[in-house]
Image: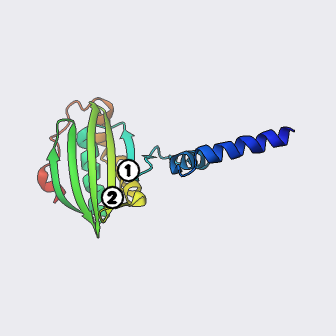
Amino acid sequence: MRGLRSVTALVGLVVTTQGCAAGGLTLLGVGAGTAASTGTAYTLDGVAYRTFTASLDDVRRATSTSLKRMDVRVKTDRATDSGREIVALAGDRTVAIELEKLTARTTRMRVTAKHGAVFRDRSTAGEIIAQTERALDDLPALTQGTRAAGRRGAGAPPSEASFR
């Protein structure tokens, strides 16, 4: 009798979520650890997010280093009300990066890598975030010290030319 109830509940779940990939992917993601141990989160449509304990200027500098390391060409880099917006080309993919200043020492990064008009490349977006994290770790000790001290006495932010 107990087995019959379990089967009935499972069939009911399958029938009510028929065609709903979000439910299945969410359950699969919980078991498989969708947000990797790096702290990068992904939406179902392939957008990667990561919040860094670093200033907007430091994350921008690290992003520039990462894109150069990956041979990704920056098309535009402009200031927005909340931070920066960078558009770049990686082969046949268009990469959109948003850097949002949350606090003086916290910045949220959102990366979308589009392949054509419809498809999104989740792995490229995730790798850009991973490389940015690596570049942040590689920043000179002086910068890291000022990051920890709330950017007291830090130098000027990177110039527009550093992204070209």
Q: Amino acid at mark 2?
A: Ala
Where residue 79 appears, x then y in whole percent? Answer: 15, 43
Q: Which mark is residue 55?
A: none
Q: Which residue is mark 2?
A: 113
Left or right, 71 with reference to 2: left
Residue that label 1 marks: 47
Where residue 111 appears, as percent x and y from the top left, is 33, 51
Image quarter where the C terminus lies is bottom left
| Callout 1 crowding tier (Cα within 10 Å): few <14, some 14–19, many ≥20 | many
Q: Nearer the viewer, residue 47 or 100?
A: 47
Between the residue at mark 1 and the residue at mark 2, the CA separation in whole angstroms equals 8 Å
Identified at 20% across, 44% down, the residue is 84
Compare marks 1 and 2 and give the one earlier in the sequence.
1
Query: Is the N terminus in the top left, top right, bottom left or bottom right quadrant?
Result: top right
Q: Secondary structure at mark 2?
A: strand
* Amino acid under disc 1: Val
**Which residue is at 14% across, 41% downward?**
156
On the picture, is 155 further left or further right than 43? left
Q: Are marks 1 and 2 in contact (CB under 8 Å)?
A: no
In-image side of 91 versus 131 (left or right) = left
Q: Is residue 133 above or below residue 106?
A: below
Q: Residue at x 41, y 54 (%)?
A: 126
Left or right of 106 on screen, residue 7: right
CA neighbours of label 2 inside 10 A, class few (<14), some (14 to 19), many (20+): many
Could you say where residue 43 lies in the image, as x and y percent from the top left? Answer: 43, 47
Label 1 sits on a secondary structure element that is loop
Residue 64 x %, y %: 25, 54
Camera-side residue: 158 or 154? 158
